[in-house]
Image (tube, rainbow, N blue to C red):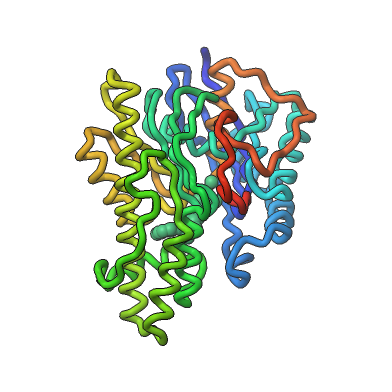
Amino acid sequence: MSAITVLGIETSCDETAAAVVIRDADGKGHIAGEVVLSQLDDHSAYGGVVPEIAARAHVEALDTLIEEALMRAGKHLRDMDAIAATSGPGLIGGLIVGLMTAKALALASGKPLYAINHLEGHALTARLTHGLPFPFLMLLVSGGHTQLVLVRGVGDYERWGTTIDDALGEAFDKTAKLLGLPYPGGPAVEAAARTGRTDRFVLPRPLVGEARLDFSFSGLKTAVRQAATSIAPVNDQDVADICASFQNAVSRTLTDRIGRGLARFKTQYPDTKAPALVVAGGVAANQVLRQTLQTLCDTDGFTFIAPPLALCTDNAAMIGWAGAERVAAGFAPDSLSVSPRSRWPLDASAQTLLGSGKRGAKA
Ligand code: KG4
Ligand code: ZN
């Protein structure tokens, strides 16, 4: 099979992004041109993503960004083999903008359209960056999702664990908010935790010890609130200690949950020569979390793969790449009548768990 060149479009949350990705005949991938416009400044005053503001910002920026990505790649629309756009899960307004733009381009150029599940984009990124063979495990930790997924092949996923309440990024954001730290909370909590004591507050580690591989973080957030209230008014050192204790509880929880996942993988795939755990999502920026996962993988004989942060957070290269993988694997293009879906589980057989992905906004 010859090289496949795909235009990718991502508009599911608060990043507007376009990219041109090439999958070589031998399966190697590279990004020919990409551009990501973060809307962080548009939303930060509200302490979260405002769907209407996001949709309008996508409309204003997307056409220019697509031109920019093509220009950076030195390509034209006619050079594309396919057009791939995120069509779920995410904020419906943004999804409509991206998918309708992709449909218009596909119709005008006669190129095939691929409607991509945003989670598939995250799941396949390590094949773009590291050429990782199937099967492998992927931990997605973002503002809207916390999932442990078995990636068996293109379009072949099994969700092993998900959050039954808050996503991990959401827990960081809420913890930050109630301690008076700025949005987004993750980086602020991590920074504050650097000068804090991890053992000053004993916070809960929900679901630790249970055989199921799900996650729960809302109890942790409540415990943080109680800890803060019990010593109010809090000074900077108190905030640092609470943040450090919070991160410590998260670390312990992940070690237990993911450790069980790695063991299950080994049981199911005893012959995999180099088993791997890939991390994705904005929380993957957290150094304590990375170190926790690295140590866990070292102990259990897994390779720990953390793609560059710009490819862990939302981007269009992963969507273009997922499109290229679909073309290469022989999947038929989607019809121009395909609809965006605000909810779209990667694993169709997985049950919806109470509260999981309830914001449905971020992936
Ligand atoms: O993947 P992402 O950029 O956006 C979506 O959720 O789509 O993830 C954003 C989340 C936010 O909740 C943010 O607080 C969290 O990632 N985050 C972090 C760190 N940097 C970003 N959480 C913990 N530590 C960090 N350093
Ligand atoms: Zn995402």
The correct choice, above or below, for 29 with respect to 176 in the image is above
Residue 119 placement, left or right of 254: right
At 36% from the left and 69% from the top, the residue drawn is: 243
Report the label total. 0
Give percent across and percent down for residue 272: 30, 21
Q: Can see residue 27?
A: yes
Residue furthest bottom as drawn: 233
Residue 149 placement, left or right of 319: left
Q: Nearer the viewer, residue 266 or 209?
A: 209
Q: Nearer the viewer, residue 314 or 139?
A: 139
Residue furthest left as drawn: 299
Q: Can see residue 311?
A: no
Residue furthest top as drawn: 1
Q: Nearer the viewer, residue 111 or 315?
A: 315
At 79% from the left and 29% from the top, the residue drawn is: 337
At 70% from the left and 39% from the top, the residue drawn is: 341
Give percent across and percent down for residue 18: 60, 43
The correct choice, above or below, for 361 with respect to 23 in the image is below
Give percent across and percent down for residue 266: 29, 27
The correct choice, above or below, for 75 with respect to 355 in the image is above
Give percent across and percent down for residue 132: 37, 28
Residue furthest front as drawn: 210
Q: Within the image, what quadrant is residue 278 found in?
A: top left
At 29% from the left and 68% from the top, the residue drawn is: 194
Residue 277 placement, left or right of 78: left
